[in-house]
Every structure is written in C-alpha cells, then in structure tokens.
Amino acid sequence: MASSETSSQASAVNIDEINECYNKLDLDFRNIKTAFRGKRTSELFRGIIVLPLCTIKTLRKREQLVMVGLKKVFGEKVFAKLLKLTFFGQFVGGETIDEVKETMIRLKKCRVKSILDYSVESDISSDEAERKAVEGIVGGEARIEPVGNIVDKETVEKTRQRYTVHKEFGDRRKDVVSARTYFYESEVQCDKNCDIFCASADAITSAIGNHGINCIKLTALGRPQLLLKLTELIAQSNNFYKTLIGSSWEDLLLNKIRKEEFLERIKDQGVQIDENMMQKWLKTVVFNENGFVDFYDWRKLIEEHERLDQMFQVYNVKTKKMEPLLNCLTENESQETVNMMERIVRTIEHGKKNNLRTMIDAEQTYFQPAISRLAMAMMRKYNKKNAVVFSTYQAYLKSCLRDVELDLHLARREGFHFGCKVVRGAYIEQEKKRAAALNYEDPINPDIEATAEMYKQVMQRIIKESQERNPGSISVMVATHNEKSIKHVVEMMREAKILPSSETVSFAQLYGMCDQVSYSLGNAGYSVYKYVPYGPIDKVLPYLSRRAEENASVLGKVRREVSLMFRELIRRIFTLNI
C-alpha cells in the first residue's frame, strides 16, 4: 500500500513538472526578455550586424579577397581582433580551452549545456583534397568471385562502384555547408586528433562537470578509405545473403531467424556443404537467445582486432570453402585498422571515466553503414547502464526511419541503452550529384516536406520506444533549428509524459544561431545544448565560411532572429537596462 502511494505521489510530481515547464515555455519563441537573457547588449548589437552580413551574396563569394584585403590594410593583429569582435565572436566559443570554458560556464548559468567541438580544418586546395582521397591504400580490394558466384555480376559491380573512391568526389567539402571535413594526413595526425578529442572532454568536465557531450567524427580517427572499404564489405555481404537465403540482414534481424531456420534456408537453395564446413561458416554468423543478430561479430574487430580479411568471409559455392570478401591487406593496412579502432575506444573511455558522453557524428552515405555498425557496437559495449555513446541519424535520407527501427530493435533485444541524435543532414547536394554521376538511387528524400515528415515520424517512433521500454533506456537529441519540428517534439513529450529534465529528450542548436529557441527551452526547464566550436582564429576560417553560407540559406530565419534581437536591444535602451 505504501509503495503504491509513493508511486502515485512521484507520478503526480512528474505531471506537475511537465505542466509547469510546458506552461512556462513560449512555443512561439517571441519572449525576447527570456530569449536573450544570456546575451550581453554588445552581443546583441554584434548579432544584428553580423547575421545580415552573412546573407549578402557578393560578400560571401568574395570572402577570400575581403579577408586578404583586410589583413593587408589592418595587419594580422588588428585583423584578428576585428574578426574576434564580429564573425568569430558570433559563431565560435573561443580560441583556447580556457576561453571556451568561460563560454560553457556562461551558457550553464542560463541552463544551456554544451557540446564541444574543436573546429580547426585543413585549409587545402581542391586538387590536394582529391589527391589525398585516392592515395595510400593500394591493396585490400573487395573480391568479386565469392559473391559473384551467387549474386548477379551487375549488382556486385554497382555496389563496388558506389563504395569506391572516385577522384572527382575526393574533395568532400564541395557542396557541403554545415559539416566539417577531415582529410587523412598521417597516423600521427590521427593520434593528434584523438588527443584533441580527449582534451575537449577534459575541458567540458572542468567547466561544467558531466553535463556536456563530446562530439567526434570517425574520419578524424583513421583513413577514410577504411570506412569506405568496411561499407562495401557490409553491402556485398548483404547482397550475398539476400540472394542465397532470400532475406537481407534487416529481414533476418527483425524476424528473429534462429540458427536452425538459417541452416534450412541455405539447404533449400541447394547449396552442397559438409557439416564441418557448415559449422565453420556458422562461427562467423552471430546469434543470441532471440535469434539472428549479424553476419559478423563486430566485437572481434573492436576488442580483438581481428583482420578485416579474416573477419569478412563467405562460403564460395564453387571452391566449397570459406573465403574472404577482401584481398589480403598489407601489414600497414591491418595496423591502420587496429589503430582506428583503438582511437575510437580511447576517446570514449576517456570521456566515460568522467561520466561524459560521446556523440559519433553522421557522415556521407558511402561511409555511414560502417559508421553506424561501429556506433552500435560501441553502444553494445558501453551503454549497459546509461547512454555513454550516441549515434546520429539523418532525416533527409529515405532510409532514416528504417535505420532507426533496426537499431531500436537491436538495442531492445540485447538490452542496452539507445542513445541517438537526429539531424536533418548536411550533404544533400553532394549526395545527389554523386548518385547521379555513379548511377545509383538517390538516397535523399524528394523534397523538404518529405524530410520534415521523416523527422516527425522518426521522433514519434523513438518516443514510442521510450514508453514501451524501461524508463531511462532511451536518450534522443533533437538537433535542429526548425521551430516547427521543436514544437512537435515538445507536444509529443507532454503527451508521452516525458520529464523535460530527464534527458530522455534533449534539444541542440549551434552556438551563435537560434538563441531565441535555446535560451527559451533552457529557461523553461527543458534539456538543451549549444554546439560550441573552438580553435585559433586563423584555423577556423573554413568553419566561419560555412556558418555564413548556412545563414544565407535560411534568410527568413535570419530576418526573424535579427528582428527579435533588435526589439530586445530597443527594450534595454528604453528601460536603461544596458
């Protein structure tokens, strides 16, 4: 009886908090006093000037000439000071760890947490970027024969073309506005990137405790071609098994196919295989008490450093032997794979020791299957009690809802905490051009309305899962500036009785943008983050260029934000609250 009364009281408190936060939030995001309470008057003035400048097309097109000209006129020191007072100050949290700590502390005072990102980028030419994309790995190509004996040659070749480096798309910065790009320089540089991610984790912990998130990109921690190679191996394996037993990895997983049925399907196809070879084959396929999990044990790659050419094997129906899907890697290539896995683990472990979470960013679709599998493997390893690792899902992809469904299903079956960030996506033009040039299906939704609907459906599905599983088993970050999407999610949270402070659902926006949303959510008691970049002025210029481009692409939002800032500036002047 006492237990029932305690539960009822807790439930009543939860409902009270939900209603209090909801009623406190201005869902039109027009309460200027609340929206800009964390902004100094000088920062409002800066935003009113800087944001409209970002929308001037001529200025953006000639930004390099403008930068060079200003440097010549004012000199390096004065130019840096000018930039820090304007564009840099608007969009970047600081040059150094100490400076960005101050920014994070200020945000925390306004109930806004931080996702820290070291935003230094290689300022290299397009030709050099293309050269870097194709240099380095010369061996380790996927073998067609084991798959080609089962799958038609056209499908095998199309898959190979899609997941192969093409020099004309080697500069992964082209047509990309809102995402940073890493180019492989050396194993030493990858180690340095890992050190930087760890230093960022330390900075977050020092400034705001365990209330922040460390954001990483896997292309910073190893040669991108390795991720491309992994993705092709995943795709070719799926082709092989789908043809052989009539089911893709997704079908087998969702239908919980057991080992016995798996064997029967192989036999039904008339594949002649002796018992010893069958047992050897089954050792590569992962089952648990609920049935099929995966064609390969990703734990072996991450924890045991198994070679790719040993891990990815299928049965060759002609030779009647288990054969690798990958030509033998060189010792350097094998070691680079091991190094990449070790860096990923090291970064996550470094944050985990301070109860800090790590978010793995999404990248282009030709990398994403490998990134997603590695992220899920890391979740399986670290998310046993709470969300330590987050994966990222891009709502502009046609496959987004299906991908989320599969990963939710896997997390539920294996009993680990599911952590994710949902974004719209950053590579739309690049993805469309590459698909058209290489003649594969465009992976992007047909229009912006379809992407908005996808975002809504994905959030509905994740929130539904949070209700069906134990409390605290799901953590999702709504990373968007779209006010309509944010309103939808706030309403979903209220309907599902999700505590705003629980971090089951969090929100995130970029530093220097969409402040009326971030500060309003934080003030009302919702869990909200700012994505805070930092780095030396001369090294973050590419990042600043992208922010200018991004603001230009959402002109209506910029006008509204500037209008709100101007109203707040006038209010402060007339109330002498400057």
Image: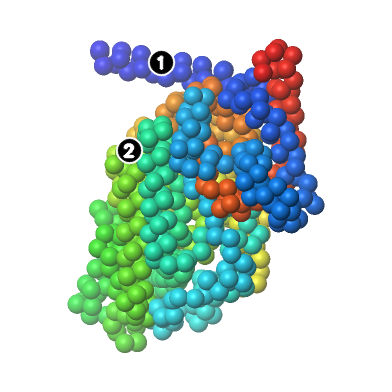
Please determine whether, in this image, residue 408 is positioned above or below residue 374.
Answer: above
What residue do we see at 71% from left, 53% from top? Answer: 72
What residue do we see at 45% from left, 47% from top? Answer: 215
Which quadrant of the view contains residue 158? bottom right
Q: Relative to 126, is 199 on the left or the right? A: left
The quarter of the image holding the C terminus is top right
Q: Relative to 290, is 507 on the left or the right? A: right
Residue 365, percent across and down?
53, 61
Viewer-closest of 502 and 332: 332
User: Which residue lies most toward the right here?
Assistant: 58
Please determine whether, in this image, residue 159 is positioned above or below residue 289.
Answer: below
What residue do we see at 34% from left, 60% from top? Answer: 341
The amino acid type of the residue labelled 2 equals: Asn
Please determine whether, in this image, residue 150 is positioned above or below residue 122.
Answer: below
State whether residue 520 appears in this view: no
User: Which residue lies most toward the left here?
Assistant: 276
State whether residue 129 appears in this view: yes
Residue 13, labelled with which disc?
A: 1
Residue 355, labelled with which disc?
A: 2
Disc with the residue nearer the chain's start (2 vs 1): 1
The quarter of the image holding the N terminus is top left
